[in-house]
Image (tube, rainbow, N blue to C red):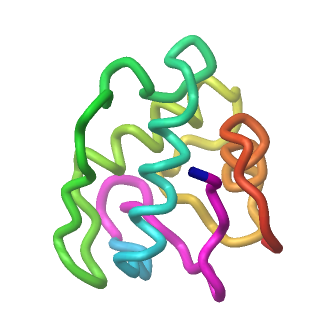
Amino acid sequence: MALTIPPGFQSVGIRNGSKQATNRGQDQSFVFAMLKAIPEAQGGAAQQLAGEGVPILGNGTCSTFLADLIKRFQRSAGGSTDGVVDPGGNTLRLLMQRSGAHGAM
């Protein structure tokens, strides 16, 4: 299945462990799918998440599980570890590169 960024992608995660980002359900699912497509050696969670679904808590709320996966990816990439994937940001760009996702950021 090809990974394509949802139209109008908005921020996903919990910024610095305390502030919920926009967290639309479709955007959370996209971030989860990218993390699931990336081997753990590259900061993803392919082996850990094999067969797992993302715990979507509803629009406006990201699970700490997904936010922690985002932070782990950010640590592996050596950048900011704010726990959020922002539109047009470095974390989104790297996730898309490593997972093979496409579409306009």
Q: Main secondary structure of the magenta part?
A: loop
The relative height of residue 10 versus residue 36 in the rendered view (above or below) is below
Which residue is located at x 50 percent, y 17 percent?
40
Which residue is located at x 56 percent, y 80 percent?
10
Q: Position of residue 44 (x, y in %)?
A: 51, 29
Quarter of the image for residue 97 reads: top right
Q: Is residue 4 shown left or right of residue 26?
A: right
Quadrant of image for the C terminus:
bottom right
Q: How many numbered circles does the render carry?
A: 0
The relative height of residue 97 versus residue 48 in the rendered view (above or below) is below
Q: Could you say which is closer to the camera, residue 51 or residue 96?
A: 51
Quarter of the image for residue 41 reads: top right
Q: Is residue 12 shown left or right of residue 17?
A: right
Q: Position of residue 28 (x, y in %)?
A: 41, 65
Magenta-colored span:
2-19
Q: Position of residue 53 (x, y in %)?
A: 24, 48
Whether residue 18 appears in magenta in the rendering, the answer is: yes
Which residue is located at x 62 percent, y 56 percent?
3
The residue positioned farthest toward the bottom in the image shown: 8
Q: Could you say which is closer to the camera, residue 34 or residue 12?
A: 34
The residue positioned farthest toward the front in the image shown: 1
The relative height of residue 68 versus residue 62 in the rendered view (above or below) is above
Whether residue 3 appears in magenta in the rendering, the answer is: yes
Q: Is residue 1 shown left or right of residue 23?
A: right
Q: Position of residue 79 (x, y in %)?
A: 70, 36
